[in-house]
Amino acid sequence: MKKAILVLTLSLSAFATFSCREAEENDKETVIVKEVEVERTEDREGILERTAKKVDQEVNKEIDQEIENIGDDN
């Protein structure tokens, strides 16, 4: 009985030792890196800046219309 327990213990320890080893060279993953060129424009404004410019233009048009409606007081 002691021999059976000894053999079982040795076989389980051997199994645990060899089953946790790293994969062979054939099992290695291949990583492919692609380089992509991105064309950047000189204008690096974000969406908030572009929206603010459009709003400023519209507000300036409304101000100009109100000035014309008031007229010249001279």
Image (tube, rainbow, N blue to C red):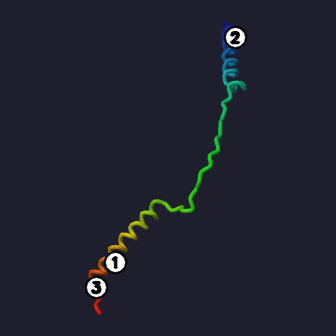
Q: Which mark is residue 29?
A: none
Residue 60 at x, y percent in the picture: 37, 74
Above/below status of 13 relative to 50:
above
At horizontal 28% and vertical 85% (from top left) the residue drawn is: 71
Q: Is residue 35 left or right of residue 52?
A: right
Residue 59 at x, y percent in the picture: 35, 72
Specify the farthest residue to the bottom.
Answer: 74
Residue located beneath label 2 in the image: 7
**How far apart in space, not on screen, are marks 3 and 1 (Cα)?**
11 Å
The kind of residue tagged 3 is Gly
User: Mark 1 or mark 3, which is nearer the start of the sequence?
Assistant: 1
Above/below status of 52 relative to 25:
below
Residue located beneath label 1 in the image: 64
Q: Are marks 2 and 3 in contact (CB under 8 Å)?
A: no
Residue 47 at x, y percent in the picture: 46, 59
Residue located beneath label 3 in the image: 71
* Residue 1 location, quadrant: top right
